[in-house]
Amino acid sequence: MHNERMGFNWVGVGSFLRREFDRTVRVAGQVFVSPWVSAFLYIFIFGSVLGQRIDLIAGVPYINFVFPGILAMNIIQGAFMSSSSVLYFQRFLRSIEEILVAPFSYVEMILSFALSAIVRTLIIAIGIMLIGLTFGAVYVSHPLVFFAATFIISAVFALLGMIVGLWAKGFEQLNMVPTFIIMPLSFLGGMFYSIDMLPPVLQLVSHFNPFFYFMDLIRYSMIDHHDTSLALSWSVAVGLLVILSVLVWRLFKGGWRIRE
Amino acid sequence: MNAVEIKDFKKQYRTAKTPAVDGVNLTIKKGEFFGLLGPNGAGKSTTIHCLTGIALPTEGTMKVFGVDAVKDYREARRLVGLSPQEFNVDFFTPVRPLLRYVAGYYGIAPREARVRCDELLEQFGLTEHAEKPFRELSGGLKRRVMLARALVHNPELIILDEPTSGVDVELRHDLWRYMEELNKAGKTIILTSHYLEEVEKLAKRIAIINKGKVVAEGDRNEFIKDGDRLEAAYLRITKGQEF
């Protein structure tokens, strides 16, 4: 009756993904349409309307320069909001207990939450790419880098969202991180500009903002321009992925805020 | 073989001054219908939560059919089905998918899960409500869904935490009959309930927990000897008299 391959509960993980997909479809307007509308407005106003009055940046029209930033911000927000809200609401409704009493290992639990957030984020990203195409804003110079960076950034923020989903004791706390951390750090991480435009001190400060490296990776993969060393950007992205994976695993194993 | 072996089990919640459960030892034989009684906050649900993985024990060992419920928790989870006291589900999910998702969690492939869930829906009279979201069901139907969910992976040990709470008399009798059938089919059942007549009718062995300790344990007949009702024995014991 129980199907496992190589000791891994693939069917269980698949079932969790199916459940989250079905749930997401029930609230598609909020999950997908909202970021698509917001991305459309950013692309239209900053890229198309204002962009026509701005000179080339990094050798490309402003709309092509700003599009990777808009995409990266939505990937970051989508992954974070998905995993944090799913985990928080499962705790809130206690439906997380369905997972706790089932034969999931901690890795399988984490993978289930993270993959469901990544899938949701990829659907948001595909929609934004399609919107970008209608504005002629989409170029993908390095497809492999683009896919790898999109996946890793989604995973990093899915994991971060899981930590916040565990930590939050109420809706206010759940919404604090996107408002006070994700949005400002995305804007200050070079979403709309190249850090070359900043005074030297602020350029240095930008290097302490991890979002800068994520923006830079996506921008490089699309328009072949980067503000900092790619090796450093990859190191930050992969390093955070590893650190957050270990941290989330430890939190799940210790039962922090999920097991009494 | 013992279905459950609990040794020196202790649970101390971080925020509490005293342990919720303190040194409980309990053995439940395979195929037994076991009643676990106690006042609110006595430690019944804590014991069940630790046995099923909802909470982590602080000390002691818990085994399900010889499998350590903490160290080999994945194997142990497959052997246990829990119908919890509170409705711990996504209230917006319709009944049929709700059962199918849970079947999947236990590694049951989609085709097999579909057949199994349809069987359970039929068995619990839920077929006509299968596409309704959980929140639209009556209290009795919700209880039935909880029971069906607990059985979806055909577990050997079934833990029923207040399974008839809030259901009408007719459904309660239906559920009693169903529990008896499950037990006759060889399933081990742990039942907690505040309806003592229910436990008196169904359980063959009974334990009473009070203030985190097992204060009485024995065959049902030991509790109801001399024409006594279980309720009278329960009140005596929980007020501190010797069993």
Image (cartoon, rainbow, N blue to C red):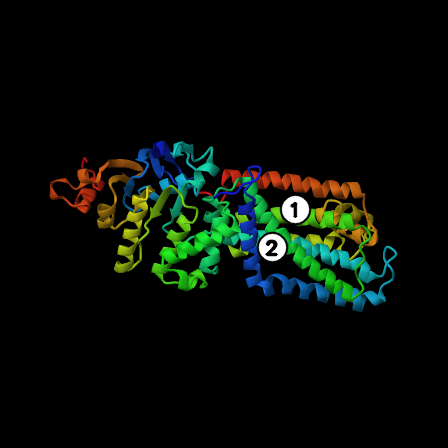
Q: Position of residue B80 (x, y in %)?
A: 40, 42
The residue carrying mark 2 is A81
Label 1 packing within 10 angstroms: few (<14), some (14-19), many (20+): many
Label whose residue precedes the other's in the sequence (1 or 2): 2
- Helix or strand or loop: what does disc 1 sit on? helix
Label 2 packing within 10 angstroms: few (<14), some (14-19), many (20+): many
Location of the C terminus of chain A (image quadrant): top left
Q: Residue at x 52, y 56 (%)?
A: A171
Q: Position of residue A209 (x, y in %)?
A: 72, 47
Q: In the rendered image, which quarter is residue B121 located in? A: bottom left
**Left or right: B60, with A158 as reference point:** left
Q: Position of residue A92 (x, y in %)?
A: 47, 53
Q: Position of residue B69 (x, y in %)?
A: 43, 35
The residue carrying mark 1 is A156
Identity of the amino acid at label 1?
A: Val
Q: Residue at x 73, y 63 (%)?
A: A130
Q: Nearer the viewer, residue B31 or A169?
A: B31
Q: Residue at x 23, y 48 (%)?
A: B196
Q: Report the chain holding disc 2.
A: A
Identity of the amino acid at label 2?
A: Met
Q: Report the chain holding disc 1.
A: A
Q: Inspect this view and state whether residue B9 appears.
A: yes
Quote the CA–CA distance across marks 1 and 2: 12 Å
Q: Nearer the viewer, residue A64 or B227?
A: B227
Instruction: Say if labels 1 and 2 share a chain.
Output: yes
Q: Is residue B240 above or below residue A76?
A: above
